[in-house]
Structure formats: structure tokens, C-alpha cells
């Protein structure tokens, strides 16, 4: 695989719509690339006490596999949650390993694994950042489309760990009201 082929794979994220919003019937939903961009900017601004280079690389690649496997959403509350989650993780890991090895960037695959396995402060922070960005997007869609997206906020509230990001989430909740 050439760099051009790799960049073509990256470009697929510009056209891949975020599944959760599509399922909610939101018109003209954001792409995975748009989500990744805002997560990256938020991480750059809010992750000031972390290894910034590592954090930004991780932010830029955290959803890269979705260009190949799709934006798979694991339904909550179903019996097959863990089975579907395991299958999704396996597909994404295989895809990332393949993509990174073809351009001889195993370091990026290692960063992806660190994120997936939540093995560093940067990985834990970025997972929270990913969720906070989703809450912000849900808030924007609620305002624009007069639709209740409460389930998205519940999901975020249950998962956030970072105290500063929890405060920002609470600010989004206050704005909802």
C-alpha cells in the first residue's frame, strides 16, 4: 500500500456518516472525520497537562478503522452487547494493524491499542473527550431539530471520569434546559 492508498483510506472518513445520528433521523449528520476534527481540537485545548503529541496522534487515529469497518454502534441493553462489542473491537484492531503495517507505522497501531485498552492518562482522557464531543453534538442537534436526544446524554454521564470534563458536560446539560 502506498501513502496515497493510505490517505485514500483516511479520506473515507469524510464520507462516512455517524451511525447514531443517522438512526435518530437527524438530517445532514456529521461525518466521522468531522467528529475526529472536533475531538482533536478539544483535546488540544483541554489536554494541556498531558503529552500533547501523543494525545493528538491518538485523537487523529482513534476512529480511523471505521473507514473500512464502518461506524458500528453497539446497542445498549441487548443480550448480545458483549459479543457485538468483542466482534467490533477485533475487526477494528485487525484493520488498524493492517493499515499501519502497510505504511510501516506500527507506532500508530501501538497508540491505537493504548487508546482501546485505556493504558495511559492520554487514552483515558481522550475516551472522555470522545464522549464529551458526542454530548456537545447531541446538544447542537437537539437545538437545531427540536428533538430529544436524552439517551446520548445518559450514555455520556455514565462514562465520564475526568473532573474538568464532567464540569463541561454539566455546562452542556444546563444549556439544554
Image: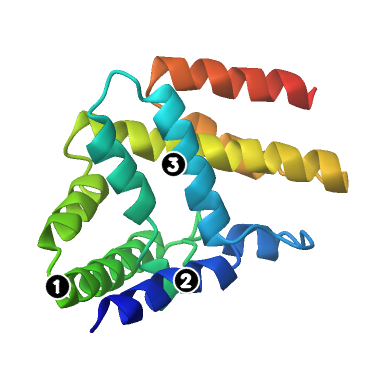
Nearer the N terminus, badge 3 or badge 2?
A: 2
137 horizontally vs 131: left or right:
right
Q: How many angstroms separate mark 3 from mark 2 (CA)?
A: 16 Å
Which x, y percent locates residue 125? 33, 31
Which x, y percent locates residue 7? 37, 72
Against 149, residue 124 (above or below) is above
Q: How many angstroms separate mark 1 from mark 2 (CA)?
A: 18 Å
Please tell me the numbered disc located at residue 11.
2
Label 1 packing within 10 angstroms: few (<14), some (14-19), many (20+): some
Could you tell me if residue 157 is visible in this image?
yes
Q: How many angstroms separate mark 3 from mark 1 (CA)?
A: 24 Å
Q: Is disc 1 in contact with disc 2, using a CB cutoff of under 8 Å?
A: no
Could you tell me if residue 159 is visible in this image?
no
Name the outermost residue toward the right: 146
Nearer the N terminus, badge 3 or badge 1?
A: 3
Task: Identify the residue at image location x=48%, y=60%.
Answer: 78
Please give the residue where the numbered disc 3 appears in the rendered image. Answer: 40
70 horizontally vs 3: left or right:
right
Q: Quadrant of the N terminus?
A: bottom left
For label 1, the SS is: helix
Please give the residue where the numbered disc 1 appears in the rendered image. Answer: 101
Task: Identify the residue at image location x=75%, y=22%.
Answer: 175
Against 126, residue 58 (above or below) is below
The one nearer the camera, 86 or 44, is 44
* Quadrant in the rendering for residue 170: top right
Task: Identify the residue at image location x=19%, y=53%.
Answer: 113
Which x, y percent locates residue 158? 47, 32
Please tell me the numbered disc located at residue 141.
none
For label 2, the SS is: helix
Against 8, residue 59 (above or below) is above
Task: Identify the residue at image location x=72%, y=59%.
Answer: 24
Amino acid at each position: 500500500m502506498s501513502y496515497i492508498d493510505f490517505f485514500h483510506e483516511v479520506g473515507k472518513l469524510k464520507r462516512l456518516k455517524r451511525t447514531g445520528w443517522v438512526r435518530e433521523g437527524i438530517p445532514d449528520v456529521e461525518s466521522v472525520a468531522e467528529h475526529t476534527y472536533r475531538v482533536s481540537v478539544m483535546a488540544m485545548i483541554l489536554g494541556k497537562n498531558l503529552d500533547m503529541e501523543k494525545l493528538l496522534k491518538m485523537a487523529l487515529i482513534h476512529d480511523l478503522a471505521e473507514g473500512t469497518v464502518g461506524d458500528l454502534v453497539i446497542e445498549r441493553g441487548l443480550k448480545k452487547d458483549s459479543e457485538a462489542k468483542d466482534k467490533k473491537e477485533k475487526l477494528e484492531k485487525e484493520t488498524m494493524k493492517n493499515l499501519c503495517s502497510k505504511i510501516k507505522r506500527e507506532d500508530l497501531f501501538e497508540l491505537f491499542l493504548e487508546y482501546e485498552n485505556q493504558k495511559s492518562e492520554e487514552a483515558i482522557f481522550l475516551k472522555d473527550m470522545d464522549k464529551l464531543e458526542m454530548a456537545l453534538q447531541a446538544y447542537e442537534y437537539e437545538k437545531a431539530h427540536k428533538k430529544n436526544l436524552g439517551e446520548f446524554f445518559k450514555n455520556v454521564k455514565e462514562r465520564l471520569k475526568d473532573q474538568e470534563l464532567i464540569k463541561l458536560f454539566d455546562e452542556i446539560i444546563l444549556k439544554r434546559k
